[in-house]
Amino acid sequence: MRTLKSLFTISFLAFTLCFSAQNMQEGFTYLETGQYAKAEQFFNDILKDYPNNKTARLCYGRAIGLNGKAEAANALFSDLLKDYPNDFEVKLNYGESLLWNSNFKDAKSYYKGLVTEDPKSFAALLGFANTLSNLKEYEDALTYVKKALEVSPGNPNALTSKKYIYLGYAYQNQQGQNYEKAEELLIKNLGLFNDDKDTLLNLGNLYLIWEKYDEAQNIYNRLAEQSEHKIIALNGLALVSHLKGKEKQALALSTEAYNSITDSTDATIKQQTKERYTQALIWNKKFKAASELINQLMAEYPNENWVLALRATLNIYKSNFKNSLEDYDQILVNDSTSFDGNLGKANVLKALGRTDEAYTSAENTLKFYDKQKDATNFINQLDLSFSPTIETKASHTFDNGDNKAYTFSANVIYPLSTKLQLLGNYSYRTTNNSVTDVSASANNLSFGLSYQLIPNLTLKGIAGLNSAEAENNDYNQLLANLSLNIKTFKLQTLELGYKRQVESFNAELLDRELVQNNYYANYNLSTNFNLGWYTQLIHTSQNDGNTRNLLFTSLYYNILPKPGLKAGVNYQHITFKDQVPTIYFSPEKFNAYEVFINLIKDEAIAKPKEWFYNLTGAFGYQFIEDDPKQTAYRVQGAFGYKFSERSLLNVYGTHSNIASATAAGFTFTEVGLRFKWVFMRSILKKSGS
């Protein structure tokens, strides 16, 4: 927010005094027209001949103070006060010199004395108002600027001060997230200064932070009606479109602004427009064009932070996080207080798995930008991800083989640090068949640990017990799950693991005490051009001597980002060493092909008090042994509501006729309810929690 000391340029001089011996009108003109260097030289020459002339000393002090030599001006006015301790004119200039030196605390007490001495002094009242504004005491500042305007109605300097006091007061409320009050102040300011550019920009920015994107769009459209500010408005409208998920529209608006730049365009606006246009190219994943433009900007503005930030952003979108980190580090070398540098670095460190360092970088942001919303939200989201969480599910499944099952499960994650987590799971499943009149139930209880060995390598180990009560057999079996998650290369993850489980699909299988030892590998590859590939391999050995091999692979394309829409093809291949069809589905070979489409608004990006959903439809063919092909279909869905950042609830369901490792030639349906609750605050106790 612009400070007000630079606005207080009223002359307090009685120019008619003491210049009968010399004409100083030329110097007064320099002061009044802002030619402070010339004024400084002029009055310096006068003082060589008339070193004790009060008016020349005052004018020289003002000239050097307004020309950036604030300390020297303050010293000069201090000497004048010693010579003229009761001269109100000298006192006013000394008070203003305190403002030039940003010595607002002393200026407050000094101006308080001046307005007490002369309650009708316009200069004293306005100086006090500006002092209070710089101290962010905006209510009192408004009181005194009002008094100044009563003394000098319509005074342009006082009106300008009043405008910036309102802007500062609104910004203060915005930072404190008192958005309604900030809006009220800015709208009042617009009433006083109709369609003022600065007020419109502040109001548009408020609506962006407040996530009132339609209101922000209206404000920028209002600004666009002023032809001289249309480029600024287009830059704002492009950002609004991006935040609303309309990336093509954002690029169109930004392109219009970029093409409107001329040689006469203000340098700051040129920079902002080039920056927004580059961002729009990145948002639309036009990485080659963005890279070429950034290279041009790097040559034109070498080592400029805003260009480094653009290159860092491009590398984030391309998942070149290490390169991005180098740019953010350079930004902080240039300016340790940089918002983009500190918070940008925090985001990159989080992506690299360096969580403790990410916390530190975000906290550094708040040291320089108190209560800044993005930095606060970043820390809060990190805190949430390291907060104790419980997730419960209750489901009912049934199929056309007259099998029914009811399942309840609860998973608990309890972080001990950013690297170490305690894991717990309990599940209960009861299943029966109404035709065979066979029933069984099982209780599973397990505990484990997850530990991040290094930023790209996480080890998870879980051990537990399965206790089953079946028609002919009650037993206990050990459960285990050991996995290693590896971020191998950019945009790639690999998970290797072993899982020991008891087959519990139906009562008959549970009664057989069928233990499976699964050795698996999951590989996922993403790209910067919306294509993705997922593959799973599982080798299973069972305690009945049989073995199974399973391959599942999926190639998909991300069509839309918000809401997420993707489509693709899946292939599944299963083989069993031994065929025991009377006991469980165990073909020598099984192949399934399907095309699918998925529409999702992910719960992770849903805001509190918003709905989220996930819908998938698939159709294809399955081939069992050498039998004729069969049609295969699958419908899955989830629909939920996010009550807060700490809790959500959703219903889910699946209906399919695709054969599994346990059955074929049937339809299968599952419906359930899921509740997730972050039941404790982050035990890491980071700031912003």
Image: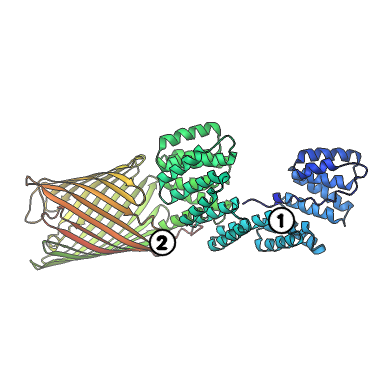
| Secondary structure beneath label 2 | loop
Q: Residue at x 44, y 36 (%)?
A: 290
- Horizontally, residue 643 falls left or right of residue 514, namely right
- Count the labels in the image: 2
Pointer 1: residues within 10 angstroms few (<14), some, or many (20+)? many
Please state which of residues 41 and 108 is positioned toward the viewer in this rendering: 41
Q: Amino acid at mark 1?
A: Ala
Depth check, front residue: 545 or 116: 116
In three-dimensional space, the C-alpha distance between marks 1 and 2, rounded to whole angstroms, equals: 44 Å
Residue 628 seen by the camera: yes
With respect to residue 497, does 182 lie above or below?
below
Residue annotated with mark 2? 608
Residue 316 in picture, x, y percent from top left: 43, 42
* Tag of residue 536: none
Q: Is residue 20 above or below residue 676?
A: above
Instruction: Characterize the local packing of mark 2: few (<14), some (14-19) or many (20 or more) Cα atoms within 10 angstroms.
Output: some
| Residue type marked 2 | Pro
**Coordinates of residue 539 in the picture (x, y in percent):** 19, 46
Q: Which of the numbered marks, if any, corresponds to residue 158?
A: 1
Rendering coords of residue 83 (x, y %): 89, 51
Q: Secondary structure at mark 1?
A: helix
Q: Residue at x 82, y 55 (%)?
A: 91
